[in-house]
Image (cartoon, rainbow, N blue to C red):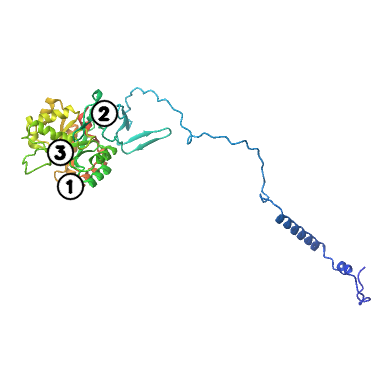
């Protein structure tokens, strides 16, 4: 019963009575119980091992591991090549023509009129802005000479002029669009300018390398890797010789045939990979059929072309070429006879006029910085103006307009 504080003020109570009289209310008791539970639970968690911290755990039976074969660690299954499809005439709307020149030496795929290479693999087709030519020399059209490699006609009649050339599509050959070929000479003498021309100019621009540079084969193969056809510049006696001298071992009008042939073979051994020879200077030599004929006959025997770099009315090259059966062409315009940017632009415009009139125009120049820049800019819109820029070999073979 409740304590009577008034009647029993001095009575000592037991500790149980004192606790009973001070018992908490129901909410307080519940809180005390809950706190006790939490303390006990915390102590249990701290002393027990639970690596998953209460996360759900799924237990599965996993079979023993087996080796997995993938495309990255297993060789691919050989796939037989499909039989070649019959040649079909491309539709007029096609913008890329494919011609496959499968020689035993270097099977090549070339594409025109655009300057693009298509490489197909198992799962993709990659289009490149240039189509690479294989490095030279190619053994089947090369023989070892006393001073280095020499071009030769290989088995089956394969000629360096063909093996080292960019293959042009049938559409390019029969197209009625006016065509322009550009040949820049003096390459290889200044390696920096040569590298700039290789990088900056379209692959259809052909290069003529002088025989006096250093690292010529390396430079030639870099140019071929970028798609450029190569010519060898052959120093010939100019008017005014010896005051005007093209360089060592120049072919001379006064020299006998054996001396000139030895000089010719020396020049031809400087590097490999050219489709033909272009005259360097040579006005006086080219005007002499007697001196010229053994030289052109040697080029014919070795399966090459001949280009008269600077046109001259006194030249006998075309007539002698017909006699010995050697393909001979002459350039129409020297585009940098005046090495000024405006003059070069005007010369290129005249070259376009020539192409409109005759269907084909060949321009020659030197690998000067200003020439490289002007040809690079001019070529950007050439197709838009209705012209086709072609490699030099395409001017030597097939229909040209």
- Circle 3 SS class: strand
Distance of label 3 from label 1 (alpha carbons): 15 Å
- Residue that protrudes farthest toward the right in the picture: 7
What residue is disc 1 on? 342
Asked if residue 381 shows in the view, the reply is: no
Asked if residue 146 shows in the view, the reply is: yes
Please name which of the two marks, 1 or 2, marks the residue nearer to the observer: 2
Distance of label 3 from label 2 (alpha carbons): 35 Å
Q: Which mark is residue 333?
A: 3
Please name which of the two marks, 3 or 1, marks the residue nearer to the observer: 3
Residue 206 drawn at (x, y percent):
22, 37
What residue is disc 2 on? 140
384 vs 195, nearest the viewer: 195
Q: Residues within 10 Å of mark 2 (few under 14, many from 20)?
A: some
Q: Is residue 321 above or below residue 187?
A: above
Q: Is residue 103 above or below residue 12?
A: above
Give the quarter of the image for residue 150.
top left
Say left or right for 297 vs 57.
Answer: left
162 vs 270, nearest the viewer: 270
Residue 24 drawn at (x, y percent):
82, 65
Residue 211 drawn at (x, y percent):
18, 39
Q: First in sequence: mark 1 or mark 2? A: 2
Distance of label 1 from label 2 (alpha carbons): 45 Å
- Circle 1 SS class: helix
């Amino acid at each position: 019963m409740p304590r009577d504080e008034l009647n029993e003020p001095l009575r000592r109570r037991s500790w149980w009575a004192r606790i009973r009289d001070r018992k908490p209310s129901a909410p307080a008791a519940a809180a005390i119980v809950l706190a006790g539970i939490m303390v006990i639970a915390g102590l249990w968690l701290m002393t027990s091992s639970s690596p998953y911290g209460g996360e759900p755990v799924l237990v599965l039976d996993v079979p023993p591991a087996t080796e997995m074969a993938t495309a990255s660690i297993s060789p691919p299954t050989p796939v037989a090549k499909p039989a070649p499809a019959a040649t079909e005439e491309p539709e007029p709307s096609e913008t890329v023509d494919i011609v496959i020149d499968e020689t035993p030496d270097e099977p090549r795929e070339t594409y025109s009129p655009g300057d693009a290479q298509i490489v197909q693999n198992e799962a993709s087709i990659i289009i490149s802005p240039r189509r690479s030519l294989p490095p030279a020399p190619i053994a089947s059209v090369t023989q070892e000479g006393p001073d280095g490699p020499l071009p030769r006609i290989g088995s089956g009649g394969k000629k360096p002029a063909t093996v080292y050339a960019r293959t042009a599509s049938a559409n390019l050959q029969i197209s009625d669009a006016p065509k322009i070929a550009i040949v820049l000479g003096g390459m290889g003498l200044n390696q920096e300018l040569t590298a700039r021309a290789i990088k900056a100019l379209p692959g259809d621009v052909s290069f003529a390398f002088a025989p006096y540079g250093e690292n010529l084969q390396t430079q030639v193969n870099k140019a071929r890797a970028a798609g450029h056809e190569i010519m060898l510049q052959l120093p010939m006696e100019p008017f005014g010789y010896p005051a005007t001298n093209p360089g060592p071992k120049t072919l001379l009008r006064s020299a006998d045939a054996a001396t000139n042939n030895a000089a010719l073979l020396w020049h031809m051994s400087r590097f490999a990979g050219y489709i033909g020879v272009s005259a360097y200077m040579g006005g006086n030599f080219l005007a002499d059929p007697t001196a010229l004929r053994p030289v052109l006959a040697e080029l014919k025997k070795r399966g090459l072309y001949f280009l008269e770099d600077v046109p001259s009315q006194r030249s006998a090259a075309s007539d002698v070429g017909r006699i010995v059966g050697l393909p001979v062409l002459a350039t129409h315009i020297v585009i940098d006879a005046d090495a000024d940017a405006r003059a070069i632009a005007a010369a290129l415009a005249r070259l376009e006029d020539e192409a409109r009139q005759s269907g084909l125009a060949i321009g020659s120049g030197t690998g000067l910085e200003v020439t490289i820049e002007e040809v690079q800019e001019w070529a950007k819109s050439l197709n838009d103006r209705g012209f086709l820029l072609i490699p030099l070999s395409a001017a030597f073979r097939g229909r040209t307009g």
